[in-house]
Image (cartoon, rainbow, N blue to C red):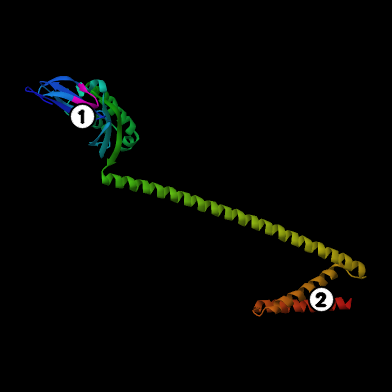
């Protein structure tokens, strides 16, 4: 639609935008979502400001207190303040450049006062400092800082390899200590078990010998009571002779009997014959 002096132009403003209108180059008002009509060439839509939440990723390189260069990535989320669209459009040419400058300033003043390990631990504090520094300044220009996050903090590749090597050596040391402690426990338990086995074996041998002695005593008393004229020594000699024949039986059952064993057998044989002769004379 037009006339001799101009025409009426229609513009569509999106839901996530606010249009800035100017008349003869001077701000005349704002237009929200919908159809906007302007009388061109006297009036025009000079610009559009997005009301969406925007994010700016700012990479920055700096040095820590222990002279390690690190790459820091800070993500800043910001949004236009509806009541300050005029300031956002006219007072600031590039909000991204402004935000980036303040992020550089905070990061390069904060990180150099921290060691590398402290930098990883205090990322939240660095992000909070960035937000507190940016918030009041950007609000003057019509932008609200919603959040600032340190999304990445990466040291030099050689430093990372050295840190990984240190951690690996530490873990290997701990593993060796645990393995040695386990071996120590096994050896202690094995020694305790061996001592207990020997103790029980000694108890068993003592009981066995006690039973043998008691059996011999009963045999002597019974034999002495049944056969007149015998003494306890005669009974002991007879028992030794019986055990001697048992030994001969066991030695003869083994083919690999040594010469010493055979010599001992001959000696015992002579003793047994003399003992048997003495008992016969009685």
Distance of mark 2 from mark 1, alpha carbons?
Answer: 137 Å
**Quarter residue 118 falls in:** top left
The reply to whether residue 170 is visible in this rendering is yes
Please tell me which residue is depicted at 30% across the width and 45% down the height of the picture. Answer: 160
The answer to which of 4 and 265 lies nearer the viewer is 4
Please tell me which residue is depicted at 68% across the width and 57% down the height of the picture. Answer: 200
> Which residue is labeled 2 in the image?
275
Q: Is residue 38 magenta?
A: no
- The 10 Å Cα crowd at callout 1, few under 14, some 14 to 19, many 20 or more, is few
**Quarter residue 33 falls in:** top left
On screen, residue 41 above or below 212: above
Q: Is label 2 in a helix, a strand or a loop?
A: helix
Please tell me which residue is depicted at 82% across the width and 65% down the height of the picture. Answer: 216
Q: Is residue 255 left or right of residue 102?
A: right
Q: Check residue 207 in the rendering and tell me which mark sits there, or answer none.
A: none
Quick one: quadrant of the N terminus? top left
Q: Check residue 12 in the rendering and tell me which mark sits there, or answer none.
A: 1
**Quarter residue 78 falls in:** top left
- The 10 Å Cα crowd at callout 2, few under 14, some 14 to 19, many 20 or more, is some
Q: Is label 1 in a helix, a strand or a loop?
A: strand
Residue 24 coordinates in the image, percent (x, y):
10, 20
Give the magenta-colored segment's residue range: 30-36
Q: Is residue 115 left or right of residue 209?
A: left
């Amino acid at each position: 639609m037009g006339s001799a002096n101009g025409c009426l132009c229609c513009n569509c403003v999106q839901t996530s935008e606010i249009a800035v209108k100017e008349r003869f180059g001077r701000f005349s008002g704002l237009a929200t979502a919908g159809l906007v009509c302007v009388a061109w060439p006297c009036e025009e839509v000079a610009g559009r400001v997005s009301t969406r939440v925007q994010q700016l990723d700012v990479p920055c390189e700096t040095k820590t207190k222990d002279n390690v260069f690190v790459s820091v990535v800070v993500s800043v989320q910001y949004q236009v303040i509806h009541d300050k669209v005029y300031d956002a459009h006219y007072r600031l040419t590039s909000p991204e450049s402004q935000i980036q400058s303040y992020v550089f300033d905070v990061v390069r003043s904060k990180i150099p006062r921290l060691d590398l390990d402290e930098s990883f631990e205090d990322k939240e504090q660095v992000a909070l400092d960035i937000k507190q520094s940016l918030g009041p300044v950007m609000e003057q220009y019509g932008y609200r800082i919603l959040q600032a996050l340190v999304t990445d903090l990466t040291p030099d590749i050689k430093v990372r390899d050295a840190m990984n090597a240190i951690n690996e050596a530490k873990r290997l040391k701990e593993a060796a200590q645990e393995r040695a402690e386990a071996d120590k426990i096994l050896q202690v338990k094995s020694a305790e078990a061996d001592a207990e086995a020997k103790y029980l074996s000694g108890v068993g041998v003592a009981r066995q010998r006690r039973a043998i002695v008691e059996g011999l005593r009963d045999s002597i008393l019974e034999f002495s009571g049944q056969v007149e004229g015998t003494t306890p020594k005669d009974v002991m000699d007879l028992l030794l002779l019986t055990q001697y024949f048992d030994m001969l039986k066991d030695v003869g059952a083994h083919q690999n009997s040594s010469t010493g064993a055979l010599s001992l057998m001959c000696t015992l044989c002579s003793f047994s014959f003399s003992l048997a002769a003495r008992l016969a004379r009685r």
